[in-house]
């Protein structure tokens, strides 16, 4: 990815998206479309036409796009998800559908299809999942049988079935993953290809404004020019090459939807009087239903922004980091939306107040583009390898960097984040010594603790950057440096507590014998002592969220 747009252009796009939504998708229209379970074809086409042109963001300039970078895409995805995750999904599907072409296509294929998406606003669909191949894509059954003429492959015939495909019955162009003799391979199909039919839209729990359908392929003929990259067997590699930033996009959906829900609960609670005062002044309300969720979302944002910067800096693929970002942001967004229903009481449970729709919509983000459990597994496995490769030094070393940060910036929570890192290293080492990752549950829990721990580090670095006036210029600036520091301290305490107490629980739970020294090695006493000041920091976060001067 490139470094992307300049700040002024990004801000213009963000404003245009908000204005477009204000005009075309006010609450009343969203509620109506949701109730009628209707894909707003005209709105999505306008978004992807010269009227808004949001698809241009992810197309390179040489093909008529704007060449947005990962950071730009995160900011725009968050903004779209604040409006409606279903509509955002329609845009995402075109992006995902064109991904195999943009990473693996031949120069001619890129020129043809990327230019057409830019100019004609074609909608795409990404056809990977099958009835029996979801998380485990390698189990796919769709086949591409070569058509051979005079000893030369002149085309393929594709047969199979795809399931849960976004834009499935409305796309113009489809990327289809099929097993060719050389292995899983992407093909590009036109909507009206012979033998290719699209199912009826699914009746879904949420994102009812998004079209999701099955695809049926019955001996569909395609030319060799439709094989992405002209070489069979590259399909899974091409899919993996973009996980870093496609997962960041879905992470941004979780962030946007979570904040959309809180941003309805916050003003509501400032107005709603109960027991002689507004709910926003009741600590038992704010410190359960608002503040922790705002903090979890901002911790995820810190990780998203850091990862987006790395990807834009061409420093690698960052697939594990993409998984951490997706896991943390979508779980936080889902929990925030659920809390927002509670925060609005009976009103929250009705359609009119929107939070129940946001809750239903955001739910998909923990499922598609890799479920939360698959994220836990990916993260757990990848960092487990780092632990082994460094003989247990991986997280101790990072703790050292955080201790140094704490030395220069004692207010940003880096010292407690360091405790979480030391604890994680010790828990991993106990797992290695006891061979505990043979229990899949332990491996996935490790993935969870890694995600929390790494987010705590990213949050404290972000708070330090904010304090020094060094946030990236395109960074979100909702909270001032002092609030970010208070939020980071709260998050670091929670992460450290999670790693130590859950770590002890599952290590003890999976080991035949108790290791009496582990409690001391993970630093449980220090982590408990570090909880001092927690309530005061949450008070400070509440004051900032509600715009009260503390
Ligand atoms: C609304 C919607 C839109 C979608 N859009 C698209 C799209 O555009 N293109 C596309 O290709 N796909 C799309 N999908 C499919 C989506 O990516 C899959 O649903 C998802 O990857 C999970 O696969 P699955 O549904 O087969 O569930 P499964 O893989 O069967 O998983 C079921 C449960 O088991 C867990 N699980 C799975 N494997 C393991 C394991 N090894 N260990 C432990 N737990 C495990 C999962 O976390 C999950 O909780 C969409 C799905 C939905 C619902």
Image (cartoon, grey):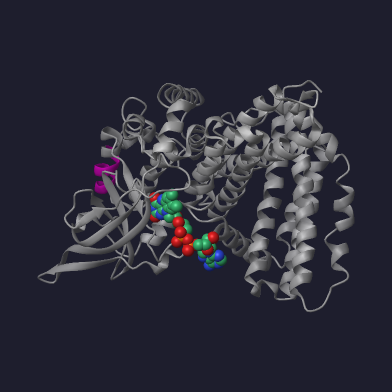
Q: Is residue 512 left or right of residue 118?
A: right
**Could you say where residue 539 lies in the image, as x and y percent from the top left?**
81, 32
> What segment carries the magenta color?
107-115
Going 84% across and 38% down the picture, which residue do you hit? 535
Q: Name the magenta segment's main secondary structure.
A: helix
Asked whether, in this view, residue 535 is left or right of residue 95, the answer is right
Q: Is residue 245 left or right of residue 342?
A: left
Magenta-drawn stretch contains 111: yes
Quadrant in which the C terminus appears? top right
Q: Residue at x 37, y 35 (%)?
A: 55
The stretch drawn in magenta includes residue 317: no
Give the answer, above or below, for where 221 lies relative to 440.
above
Residue 24 falls in image quadrant = top left
Q: Is residue 326 visible?
A: yes
Asked whether 546 or 206 is in front, the reply is 206
- Residues 62 and 295: in front is 295
**How far across and down, in percent of the image, does residue 461 sit?**
70, 40
> For the point 87% across and 39% down, which residue is it?
533
Q: Quadrant of the N terminus?
A: top left
Residue situated in front as seen by the camera: 396 or 549: 549
- Where's residue 282, x and y in %? 79, 30
Can residue 102 be seen at all in this image of the molecule? Answer: no
């Amino acid at each position: 990815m490139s470094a992307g747009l300049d700040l002024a252009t990004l801000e213009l796009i963000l404003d245009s998206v908000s204005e477009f939504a204000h005009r075309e998708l006010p609450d009343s229209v969203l509620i109506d479309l949701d109730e009628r379970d209707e894909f707003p074809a005209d709105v999505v086409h306008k978004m992807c036409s010269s009227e808004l042109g949001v698809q241009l963001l992810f197309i390179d300039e040489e093909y008529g796009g704007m060449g947005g970078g990962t950071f730009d895409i995160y900011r725009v995805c968050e903004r779209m998800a604040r409006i409606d995750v279903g509509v955002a999904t329609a845009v995402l599907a075109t992006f995902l559908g064109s991904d195999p072409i943009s990473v693996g296509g031949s120069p001619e294929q890129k020129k043809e299809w990327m230019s057409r998406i830019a100019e004609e606003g074609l909608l795409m669909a990404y056809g990977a999942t099958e009835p029996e191949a979801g998380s485990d894509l390698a189990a796919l059954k769709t086949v591409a049988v070569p058509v051979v003429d005079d000893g030369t492959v002149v085309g393929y015939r594709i047969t199979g079935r795809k399931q849960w495909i976004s834009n499935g019955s409305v796309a113009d162009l489809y990327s289809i993953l099929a097993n060719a003799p050389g292995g899983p391979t992407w093909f590009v199909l036109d909507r009206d290809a012979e033998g290719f039919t699209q199912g009826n839209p699914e009746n879904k729990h949420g994102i009812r404004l998004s079209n999701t359908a099955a695809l049926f392929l019955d001996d569909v003929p395609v030319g060799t020019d439709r094989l992405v990259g002209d070489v069979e067997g590259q399909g899974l590699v091409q899919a993996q090459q973009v996980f870093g930033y496609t997962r960041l996009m879905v992470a941004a959906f979780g962030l946007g939807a979570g904040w959309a829900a809180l941003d309805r609960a916050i003003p509501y609670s400032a107005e709603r009087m109960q027991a002689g005062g507004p709910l926003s002044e009741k600590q038992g309300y704010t410190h359960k239903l608002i503040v922790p969720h705002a903090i979890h979302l901002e911790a995820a944002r810190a990780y998203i922004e850091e990862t987006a910067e790395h990807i834009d800096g061409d420093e690698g693929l960052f697939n594990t980091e993409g998984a951490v970002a997706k896991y943390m942001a979508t779980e936080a967004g889902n929990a925030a939306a659920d809390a927002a229903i509670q925060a609005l009481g009976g009103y929250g449970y009705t359609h009119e107040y929107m939070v129940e729709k946001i809750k239903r919509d955001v739910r998909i983000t923990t499922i598609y583009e890799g479920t939360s459990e698959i994220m836990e597994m990916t993260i757990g496995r990848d960092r487990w390898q780092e632990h082994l490769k460094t003989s247990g030094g991986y997280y101790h070393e990072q703790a050292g960097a955080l201790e140094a940060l704490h030395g220069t910036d004692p207010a940003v929570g880096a010292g407690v984040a360091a405790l979480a890192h030391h604890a994680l290293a010790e828990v991993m080492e106990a797992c290695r010594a006891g061979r505990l990752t043979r229990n899949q549950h332990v491996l996935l829990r490790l993935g969870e603790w890694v995600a929390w721990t790494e987010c705590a580090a990213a949050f404290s670095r972000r708070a330090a950057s904010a304090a020094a006036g060094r946030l990236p210029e395109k960074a979100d600036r909702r909270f001032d440096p002092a609030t970010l520091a208070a939020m980071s301290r709260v998050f670091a305490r929670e992460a450290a507590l999670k790693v130590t107490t859950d770590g002890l629980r599952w290590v003890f739970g999976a080991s035949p014998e108790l290791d009496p020294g582990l409690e001391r090695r993970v630093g449980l006493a220090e982590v408990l002592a570090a909880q001092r000041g927690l309530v005061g920091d949450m008070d400070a976060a509440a004051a900032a969220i509600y715009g009260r001067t503390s």
